[in-house]
């Protein structure tokens, strides 16, 4: 019994320093993209993509969603889907 509990606890250990270095690298890349002369649309797509990647890493590793059941993952993703849907629906009104 004790070995099973130890094995389960060991299976969910996360390399937080590795995640930190990835987040730091993505932040440095975002700053570099912001100061690089490029078309505005490409810059926006790159920055939003990197921000989404960073948010996903924080949710998966620091909020421990990576090790949760699928139903909890769906509960966490529902507001994201709703937000993207509403943003796309409001896009014609903005321009």
Image (cartoon, grey):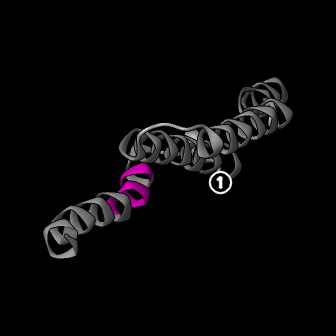
Span of residues in magenta? 73-78
Q: Main secondary structure of the magenta part?
A: helix
Q: Residue at x 43, y 50 (%)?
A: 73
Residue 69 in the image, given as x and y percentages of width and height: 46, 45
Q: Is 6 on the left or on the right of 66, as rendered?
A: right
Q: Which residue is mark 1?
A: 63
Check if residue 67 falls in the magenta segment: no
Q: Residue at x 29, y 59 (%)?
A: 84
Q: Hey, which quadrant is residue 82 in on the image?
A: bottom left
Q: Residue at x 13, y 68 (%)?
A: 92
Residue 48 in the image, given as x and y percentages of width and height: 46, 48
What kind of element bears circle 1? loop
Pointer 1: residues within 10 angstroms few (<14), some, or many (20+)? few
Q: Nearer the viewer, residue 15 or 47?
A: 47
Please state, as top left, top right, bottom left or bottom right, where the N terminus lies in the image: top right
Residue 46 in the image, given as x and y percentages of width and height: 47, 39
């Amino acid at each position: 019994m004790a070995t099973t509990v130890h094995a389960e606890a060991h299976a969910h250990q996360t390399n937080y320093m590795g995640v930190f270095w990835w987040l730091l690298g993505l932040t440095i890349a975002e700053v570099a993209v912001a100061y690089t002369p490029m078309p505005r649309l490409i810059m926006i797509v790159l920055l939003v993509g990197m921000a989404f990647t960073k948010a996903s890493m924080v949710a998966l590793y620091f909020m421990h969603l990576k090790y949760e059941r699928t139903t909890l993952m769906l509960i966490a993703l529902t507001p994201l889907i709703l937000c993207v849907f509403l943003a796309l629906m409001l896009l014609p009104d903005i321009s």
